Amino acid sequence: MKHFIFLFIFLLVLSNVLLSQTNVYDFNFDFKRIKNPAIRIDFGWDNSSLRGNDKETLTNSLSSFGLDFGFASTQDFFPIEKKVKYAFTNDTISSEQKRLFNKSLTDNSFWGLGLSLKHYTNSNNTYNNFSGAFVVNFIRMDGSGYKFGGNSNLKLLTGSNMAWYWLDYSYADEKPPPPSGGEPTIQYANINCFEPFSSIRFGTKYRSEVSFQFMRGVSICGEANRMVIFPRTLFWKYVGSEMVYSIGGGVVSYFTGKIKTSNPYVYPVVDFILKTGLNFGISELQKDKMNWPYNTAPPLIIDQYRIGLQLEFGMVNKK
């Protein structure tokens, strides 16, 4: 019964947010946002952690390689032509103002499927049983950015996506000797803590990315993300946790939506910072409880820091 009460409260809050929006809801039924096929290649370094009773039981460094397939878009910041309109209040921005903003601002997204492989990077003073992971995840990142001269622009994107993980770990009979004859500085992982992750596991991946396009169809990307790997899937608790996240996301989107119409030039930065902060805050709460606020087991956390190259195959801003 408590799940249905929670669902009712969530739908009530969501309806109030939607009814208070001041933007025109545009359903133009075109698919411009998925017309530019794109490939992203990235690599980087990852740190993993798994909390025990009151501390992290795992710390290491992983080197990883990723490959994303999908569709990228760079659209007008304010759509002007609308085929079907449904609005609760009037749109207060004139077409002339929208055209002016569209000369220096963009609306961006990336949809697709991501594959990545991670390997443990050995060193003299780190050791644990976790040796790597294979990750498959859906990708949806959205955001805005700024146009510069020629074909260059800056994109600020955030996203939260479902992912599946296959972890690789080994059974070690003995701990290695401490570095330099002293006490080890790394908390060794107990193999028992990996038992819940012994097969394919479900989780969430939070992403924040800054991308700079320096020529048509070619961008350099810098990304920080966090993967939250669940030791088991508890459907109703997962749904309840996602509802809390959705309410937070709705509040942030409502607030930044007001900024978009009042001061469009600062909107991309504010939207990026607040949504990144929301994702980081939720994932911090999940470190102890995978389905926060429910009392559930701690997940395996992998923090990633990556750089990459994105190639788009299509005419950007093609009408």
Image (cartoon, rainbow, N blue to C red):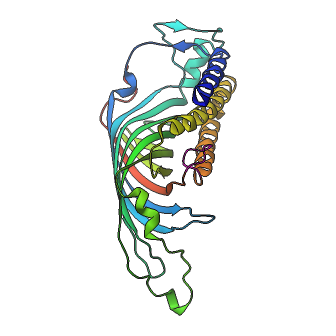
Q: Eyeballing the image, is 183 above or below 200?
A: below
| Residue 98 position within the rendered picture, expressed as x and y whole percent measured from the top left | 58, 18
| Residue 302 position within the rendered picture, expressed as x and y whole percent measured from the top left | 48, 57
Look at the image and tell me whether residue 124 can be seen.
yes
Residue 294: say if magenta. Answer: yes
Tell me the residue at 63%/44% (across/down): 277
Left or right? Give the position of 258 relative to 74: right
- Which secondary structure dominates the residues rendered in magenta? loop
Look at the image and tell me whether residue 147 can be seen.
no
**Closest to the observer: 87 or 101?**
87
Left or right? Give the position of 238 relative to 136: right
Residue 157: say if magenta. Answer: no
**Closest to the observer: 48 or 4?**
4
Residue range corresponding to the magenta coloring: 289-296
Tell me the residue at 47%/37% (across/down): 235
Name the image quarter holding the C terminus.
top left
